[in-house]
Image: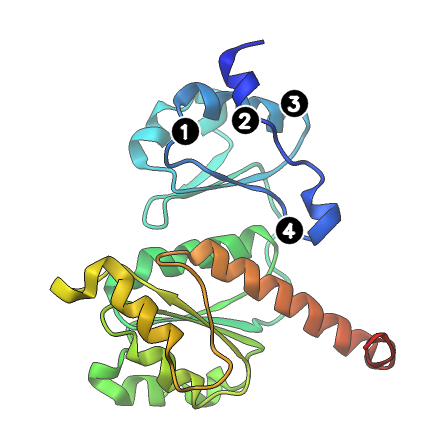
Amino acid sequence: MSSAGREVRLDVGRRARIGLDEAILCETKTPEQLSHILDEAADGGRTMLLTRLSEPQFQALRAEHAAVLDYHALSQTGIFGAIAPPEGPARIAIVTAGSSDAGVAHEAARTLAYAGVACELVCDVGVAGLWRVLEQVDRLAEMDVVIAVAGMDAAMVSVIGGLVPGLVIAVPVSTGYGVARRGETALYSSLTSCSPGVAVVNIDNGFGAACAALRAVAHARANRADPVGAANAR
C-alpha cells in the first residue's frame, strides 16, 4: 500500500449516520493524497465534495480526475462526479455584507448544491447602506434558514437576527483592517449579538454553516411532512 493509502481513510458511512456526506478538506493535502482519495471515489462510483481546493492543486490533478471535477475557483470547491440539480423552492438564503465575503458565501452555496438543496444568494447588503438589507427583509423572512456572511464588525448579523423569524447562522469572515484581526472581531461580535438565538460557526467556515443549515432544513421538512409524528416524537 502506498503512503497515501495508509494516511487516508474515507468515512463512507457518514451519510447513513448523520445524513451528511464526508467532505474532503484539501488545503494541506498532497497531490498523492488527493489522487488516492479520488481513485477511491471513482472506484466506488461515489460523488464527493472537495473544499479549500486551490487552483494550483486543481491544476495538478490527474487528467482523468480533473475531467469529472466541477471546479469553482472563487469558493475553492470541487464537486467530483455528477449530482442532480437542486429540487424545489429555496428555503435557505445566504446573505453577504460585502463583495469581499463572496468566496465564503459561495462555499456555503456549493455545499448546499452538492446536497441537492436550493438556496438564494443575496449579496452586498451590509449595514453601511442599511437600506440594502431592509429591502430584502420580506423575502428573508420567508426562509427557514438565513446564513449571514459578514466580516469587519459583522453588524449585519445582529440586524438580520432582529428582523427574521428563521434560524440565523452567522459566518464571521476574515475581511477588514487592523483590529478586525482576520475575522476575530466579526466572530466576537457575532457571539455577543443581542439578537437572540443566532448560531455562529468558525471564521470563514461556509461549509460548516451550510451543514448546520442542512440539518435544520431536514428537521423542518420532517415536521412539514408529518407534523403529528414530529410532535409525538418530542
Callouts 2 and 3 close, C-beta under 8 Å = no
Can residue 177 be seen here? The reply is no
**Mark 1 burial class by Cα count in 10 Å: few <14, some 14-19, many 20+:** few
Considering every residue shown, the one lying at the far left of the view is 178
Between disc 1 and disc 3, whose residue precedes? 1
Between disc 1 and disc 2, whose residue precedes? 1
Question: Label 2 vs label 4: CA separation?
Answer: 18 Å
Residue closer to the observer: 221 or 135:
221
The quadrant of the rendering that contains the N terminus is top right
Amino acid identity at mark 4 = Leu
Question: Does residue 36 lie above or below 147 as drawn?
Answer: above
Question: Label 1 vs label 2: CA separation?
Answer: 10 Å
Percent across and percent down for residue 121 are 42, 69
Between label 4 and label 3, give the one nearer the viewer: 4
Callouts 1 and 2 close, C-beta under 8 Å = yes
SS at badge 4: loop
- What residue do we see at 72% from left, 39% from top? 13
Residue linked to disc 1: 29
Amino acid identity at mark 3 = Asp
Circle on res. 20: 4
Between disc 4 and disc 3, whose residue precedes? 4
Considering every residue shown, the one lying at the far top of the view is 1
Amino acid identity at mark 2 = Ile
Circle on res. 37: 2
Residue closer to the observer: 123 or 158:
158
Callouts 4 and 1 close, C-beta under 8 Å = no
Between disc 4 and disc 1, whose residue precedes? 4
SS at badge 2: helix
Residue 158 relative to residue 85: left or right: left
Percent across and percent down for residue 187 are 33, 67
Between disc 2 and disc 3, whose residue precedes? 2
Question: Label 4 vs label 3: CA separation?
Answer: 21 Å
